[in-house]
Every structure is written in structure tokens, then in C-alpha cells.
Amino acid sequence: MKARKVKGLDADGAFEENARRIVEVRLRELTALASHALDDGAVDELHDTRIAAKRLRYVLELAGPGLGRPAATGARVARGLQDLLGEVHDCDVLLARIRRHADRLRAEDAETVRLRATRPGAELEAEAAQHARNLDRHWGLEALTAFVTARRKILYERFAREWKALERRDFAGDLLAGITSCSG
Amino acid sequence: MAKARKIPGVGPQSRFRDVAAASVEVRASEVFGQMDGVLDIEDIERVHDMRVATRRLRAVLEVFATCFPKKDHKQLLREVKELADALGERRDPDVAIAWLSDIAAELGEEARPGIEGLADDFREEQRDGNDLLAAGLERAREARLAERLTELARSARIEVDER
């Protein structure tokens, strides 16, 4: 996801004013994306929200000397969101990976079993399936899938709860007011 | 994980371009100060520390983009991203292997063959990732990435019409 361009930056201007402009834009990006990610909890939307949280976190960490305590507090919140969404993303990546790995094992087994046919085109005996070599591997992969799927759901629900709580206490409004009073 | 060093001499009224220069200098020195032992797959924290430092440098380059000559900035940001990607190629399997090892212990003997098979895939990726990282570090060294970042930082301090 490409970051939105920040207008009106002045390289010769004061650090605090430029930092405030960047924080405003990054904060708006995060709030727009997070609300959208909550609508359906889709993989791509959550990934974009994580990137937006990361960008906000980094600019707030950099802006600390210019924007004071509100920036530090905001950076902690953004980091919390980034970490949580990072764990959700790790689950999504791992689940896709387990599926690919299991599919490969199944394909290998099918080929092994197919080769047990006595001659091309001959009927295959069910007994041939006993020669599949990867059967003992599937239990672990299924257990892992169940665990990671459940963990992903718990993490997503935690994110949804935390984001709603941030919205209720107007985290974005407070942060903007805080950094504006610091730079104003 | 190494804590980010404070950027010296920065205050609310500092010129944006001066903060940009100081930030790039400090963050770039953090990246290249983490190179020792980064290819040792027995010590996965070194790659992690260098990757974190690279992310911080990349963030600084993006936040202060307006302070640098456009062409040099674009090229150096691309090279820093490539270095970050190379570190990621090693770090991602490092993390997966460590995590699967913990989870296999918890899930018990019956789960071990499946999880070990998956971990073997990640070990292969780890070796490939280490080769990619070695090549990435060599490229950065040959391209004098550290020195050119220092030059970029210096250029930020010069007014646009003086460039």
C-alpha cells in the first residue's frame, strides 16, 4: 500500500510543524483503513491497516522531540496495533503455507499410490493407498491448522475490541488535539 | 532488540532538513553497526537487530523525503528497501523455525512428523535466505551504501537553491 503524499511540507520550516502535518495524514490513513478492516476482517484490509499503523508509529516516534508527550503516547498505541495486526498477518501467512505444504504431500502420496497400478490403465486396488508415505504427517498439520486458525480468530477479535475502544475514547481526536497544542 | 539511539540536537524549532540529516546519519550508522555475525544462522537475533535498524532507516528516509535531492533519495531508498528485503528473506524462516519448534513440543509426539516436515521446508528457505542476504550485504558494500547515505544526509543540510 502506497502512503498518501503529505502536502505543504517545508524543508526549511520547523520540525514540529512538518511533523504535525505528517502525523495528521498518517492518522487519517489509519482510521480510514481500520474502520474498513473491521467491516469484514479481510486479509488484505488488515494487512494495509498494519502498514498504516507502522507508518504512524514511526513518524510519531521520530516526532517525539518536536511534538512531546502526545506523540509518545500515540506511538505506543500505534505500536500495539501494529504488533497485534502483525500476529494476525503471521497467522494468515502460516495458514497459506501449511495448506500448500499439505497439498504437496497429498500430491506426492497420490503419485506414489498411482504407481502401484500393475500396468497403465489397470484398475487400482484400494490396498495401494497403504503405500502413501506421508499419512503420519497430516495429523500434525491438521492440529497446527486448527491451532493457528483459532489463534487468528482470537487475535482478530482482540484487535476489533481494541480499535472500538480507541474509537470510543476518540484516540484520533485526542492525538490531533495533543500534537496541535504542542506545536501551536 | 537494540533501542534506537536518540537523535542529537533535535527540538521543536529545529529546521526540518537539519533533523533529516541528523536522523539519517544516526540511523544509517545503526544499520551498518549491526553487520557483524549477521550471517550466523545459530544466532538469529543479529539478523533481527539489523532488520529493525533498517526499518528505522527506511522510515526516516520516507518521513524526511522532501529534504533530499529527489533522484539520489529515490535510488538510496530503493537500495535500503532491497537490503531490508534480503534481511526479511533470512528473518522470516528464522522466526517460523523457532515458533514451530515451540509448538511441536506442546502438541506432542503424534504431531511431530508433520510439523518437522514443515520446519524442514523453512530450514531450506533459511539457507537460501542466508545466501540472498550474503549477496545483499556484498552489494551494499560494493555500492558504498553507507558512504552514500552519509553524503545524502549532508546534502539535506544544503538549501535547495545551493544544490
Image (cartoon, coloured by chain):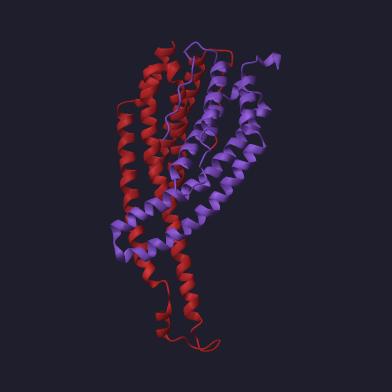
For the point 62% across and 42% down, which residue is it?
A: B138
Q: Is residue A161 above or below residue B26?
A: below
Quarter holding residue A69: top left
> What x and y, as percent, mark residue A24?
46, 23
Say which colour chain B has: purple
> What x and y, as percent, mark residue A79?
39, 33
Quarter holding residue A164: top left
Residue nearest the observer in this picture, B106 or B139: B139
Q: Is residue B109 above or below residue A72?
A: below
Q: Is residue B8 above or below residue A55?
A: above
* Residue A28 appears in view: no
Residue nearest the observer in this picture, A109 or B134: B134
Quarter holding residue A126: bottom left
Say which colour chain A has: red
* Residue A115 appears in view: yes
For the point 55% across and 33% down, which residue is it?
A: B32
For the point 52% across and 35% down, which residue is it?
A: B54
> What x and y, as percent, mark residue B100?
38, 55
Q: Is residue A117 above or below residue A40?
A: below
State how many labels appear: 0
> What x and y, as percent, mark residue A99?
44, 60
Residue nearest the observer in this picture, A9 or A54: A54
**Quadrant of the drawing holding the C terminus of chain B:** top right
**Quadrant of the drawing holding the N terminus of chain B:** top left
